[in-house]
Image (tube, coloured by chain):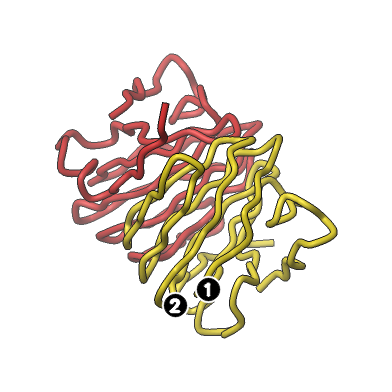
Chain colours: A yellow, B red
Amino acid sequence: MRPEAVNLAKKLALFRDLWSPKVVASFNGHDVMVVKVKGEFVWHAHSDTDDFFLVLSGRLTIDLRDGPVTLGPGELFVVPRGVEHRPRAEEETELLLIEPAGTPNTGNPATAAVKTRL
Amino acid sequence: MRPEAVNLAKKLALFRDLWSPKVVASFNGHDVMVVKVKGEFVWHAHSDTDDFFLVLSGRLTIDLRDGPVTLGPGELFVVPRGVEHRPRAEEETELLLIEPAGTPNTGNPATAAVKTRL
C-alpha cells in the first residue's frame, strides 16, 4: 500500500468531540493522534510512558504538582513517565499527541477514551 | 529537574546549517528533532525504524521508488521501515523529525550527520 501524507487541518475538520483522540498515523509502535480539548482533564500519570504534546492551535496548560506549563502553537512538551499531570484549556485547543499504541489516555484503561482512527 | 516547554520557532532561530538535525526533546527512547533542509538528500532506508516527518514551514518532497509524496506545513508522513526514500526541497524547509535515539539519518552510521542537542 502506498503511504499517504496526512494533513492535520483536514483531519481536525472531520470531528468536533472534545478529549477524544483520533489516530492519524503510526510509527515504531506509537500512535500519532489529533485531539480537540477545552476545559479540564483529570489528574493522571502514565507509569511506563512519556507523554508528548504539541499545540497546533489555541493554548494548553499542563498542570504539574510543582506548577503549570503553558503552551501555544508550535510549542511542545513531554511529560515524563510517572509524573502526575492535568491538561486544561480555556479556549478550544488542538493538539498533536504521540503515545505508544494502546496507552490509555487517563493512565487507566477503565476511564480512558476509545481512540478511533481517522 | 522541572521539564520545560519547547518552542520550535525559537529552536529553529538558533542555527542555519542544513540537513543537520538538532534534538529538542526526547520521549520513549525517541529523539524529537528540528532540521532545515534545502536541495536533495541521499536515497536511503532504515531497515528497523519508521521515519516520521512533519513540515513546519516550506515544502518537502519525499521521493519513493513508486513516486513522490509532497508535504506542506501541517502535513506529516511516515516512511515505513525498509522503504527507500529521498527527501528534497526546492526552498528552505523546516521539519520536525522523530526517530529512535541513535538512528543514523542516512540509515548508515558512516555517512550520518551528528545530531546535536539544542
Question: Residue A28 versus residue A74: which sits nearer the camera?
Answer: A74
Give B98 or B1, whichever is nearer the viewer. Answer: B1
Mark sitting earlier along the chain (1/2): 1
Quadrant (top left, top right, bottom left, bottom right) of the C terminus of chain A: bottom right
Residue A25 spot, x, y in % from top left: 61, 59
Q: In the picture shown, does residue B77 fall above or below A50?
A: below
In the rendered structure, find residue A92 and report the number of the disc placed on it. 2
Left or right, B22 with respect to B52, comes to left
Residues at circles 1 and 2 in contact by the CB criterion of under 8 Å: yes
Residue B75 coordinates in the image, percent (x, y): 43, 64
**Which quadrant holds the N terminus of chain A?**
bottom right
Mark 1 and mark 2: span between their CA atoms? Answer: 7 Å
What residue appears at the point 22 percent right and 37 percent down from the top-left corner? B18
Decide if residue B31 is on the left or right side of residue B113. Answer: right
Q: Position of residue A95 (x, y in %)?
A: 48, 64
- Point 43% across, 72% down: residue: A93
Q: Chain of mark 1?
A: A
Helix, strand or loop at disc 2? strand
**Residue type (three-letter) at the residue carrying disc 1:** Lys
Q: Are marks 1 and 2 on the same chain?
A: yes
Q: Residue B13's image quarter?
A: top left
- Tag 2: amino acid: Glu
Is B24 situated above or below B94? above
Give residue B25's quadrant in the image.
top left
Crowding at mark 2 (Cα within 10 Å: few <14, some 14-19, many 20+): some
Secondary structure of the residue carrying tag 1 is: strand
Q: Position of residue A73 (x, y in %)?
A: 32, 62
Can you identify the residue that label 1 sits on?
Answer: A36
Q: Nearer the viewer, residue B98 or B87?
A: B98
